[in-house]
């Protein structure tokens, strides 16, 4: 799967980063990305090109609010 991030509300996106979703049958595999930086208007774009059935069950973000 590929992840692309926009920090300006979706007007422009950074280059895609490839992430593994695991092999067929590896149901407990998670795709994680850390230390993405700072922004106010995040938009995440995910694309999956493999010809397999895919289901995204959920998404989670651990967000730290700046004191500035």
Image: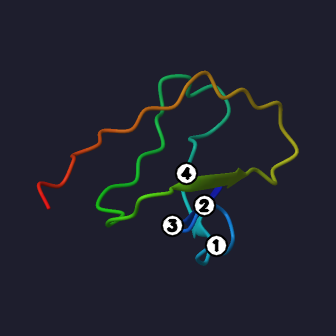
Residue 56: quarter of image: top right
Residue depth check, mark 4 versus mark 2: number of the one nearer the observer: 2
Earlier sequence position, callout 1 versus callout 4: 1
Earlier sequence position, callout 4 versus callout 3: 3
Residue beneath the point at 51% across and 31% down: 59
Measured in 3D between alpha carbons, the distance from the residue under mark 2 to the one under mark 3, in whole angstroms, is 6 Å
Residue depth check, mark 1 versus mark 3: number of the one nearer the observer: 3
**Disc 2, disc 3: CB below 8 Å?**
no
Q: Is the C terminus in the top left, top right, bottom left or bottom right quadrant?
A: bottom left
Residue 43: quarter of image: bottom right
Residue bearing the label numbered 3: 7
Measured in 3D between alpha carbons, the distance from the residue under mark 1 to the one under mark 4, in whole angstroms, is 20 Å
Instruction: Describe the element under mark 2 as helix, strand or loop.
Output: loop
Q: How crowded is mark 1: few (under 14 residues within 10 Å), some or many (20 or more)?
A: some
Residue bearing the label numbered 4: 20
Compared to residue 20, the image places residue 2 above or below, namely below
Q: Is residue 10 left or right of residue 18?
A: right
Residue beneath the point at 69% across and 71% down: 11
Give the colour scheme of this rendering. rainbow
Q: Residue 63 appears at what percent x and percent y?
A: 29, 43
């Amino acid at each position: 799967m590929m992840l692309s991030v926009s920090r300006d509300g979706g007007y422009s996106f950074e280059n895609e980063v490839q992430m593994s979703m695991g092999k067929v049958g590896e149901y407990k595999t998670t795709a994680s990305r850390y230390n993405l930086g700072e922004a106010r208007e995040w938009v995440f774009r995910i694309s999956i090109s493999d010809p397999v059935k895919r289901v995204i069950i959920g998404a989670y973000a651990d967000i730290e609010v700046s004191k500035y």
